[in-house]
Image (cartoon, rainbow, N blue to C red):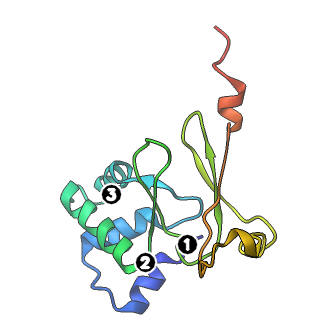
Amino acid sequence: MSDLLERLRGRGWRMTSQRRVVAEVLDGEHVHLTADEVHARAVRRLPEISRASVYNTLGELVTLGEVAELSAHGRAKRYDPNAHRPHQHLVCSGCGLIRDVHPVGDPLADLPAQERFDFAVSDVEIVYRGLCPSCTAGPPPA
């Protein structure tokens, strides 16, 4: 479970009803929603919330470093509340489902010195791609 709400409260982030609802929608494990999905879920909780409020709040959360913005090959950007927990992503090439994964080992250590080209490497982003069980199974028989 993400600790997004707790982190935001700890930062003293002004928690308006709109901001709180967006944070609640994003809070959870394996949450990788598009802005439109966040808006649709937020409207169920707070019918008067505008699309602009959702987009502005997502932008603030990304700027604060509390939510990570993910791009997956031509698909809509998604928002990940687990910005403070090191992890990688497993992405379904069929439907776009994204799951958090925690491979063992240190990917920084796996990059040989001669392949660093004198960069001071500070972060690694790895995306595993494949088909989820639903996409592997194909369409149901007619």
The kind of residue tagged 3 is Ala
Tell which tag, 2 or 1, sits nearer the viewer: 2
Which numbered disc flags the more N-terminal residue, 2 or 3? 3
Location of residue 21 in the rendering, given as x and y in whole percent from the top left corner: 33, 67
The quadrant of the rendering that contains the C terminus is top right
User: Given contact means CB atoms under 8 Å apart, are the residues at marks 2 and 3 in contact?
Assistant: no
Q: Which mark is residue 116?
A: none
| In the rendered image, the vertical position of residue 112 relative to residue 128, given as above or below | below
Q: Residue at x 45, y 53 (%)?
A: 33
SS under mark 1? loop
The kind of residue tagged 2 is Gly
Tell which tag, 1 or 3, sits nearer the viewer: 1
- Name the side, left or right, on which 142 lies relative to 9: right
Q: Residue at x 30, y 73 (%)?
A: 60
Label 2 to label 3: alpha-carbon separation: 21 Å
The kind of residue tagged 1 is Ser
Label 2 to label 1: alpha-carbon separation: 14 Å
Location of residue 19 in the rendering, given as x and y in whole percent from the top left corner: 29, 72
Q: Which residue is mark 1?
A: 2
Label 1 to label 3: alpha-carbon separation: 17 Å
Q: Quadrant of residue 59?
A: bottom left
Location of residue 32 in the rendering, given as x and y in whole percent from the top left corner: 50, 56
Q: Badge 3, how many Cα within 10 Å: few under 14, some, many 20+?
A: many
Which numbered disc flags the more N-terminal residue, 1 or 3? 1
Q: Badge 2, how many Cα within 10 Å: few under 14, some, many 20+?
A: few
Q: Which mark is residue 42?
A: 3
> Is residue 72 visible in the rendered structure shown here?
yes
> Is residue 50 visible in the rendered structure shown here?
no
Q: Which mark is residue 65?
A: 2
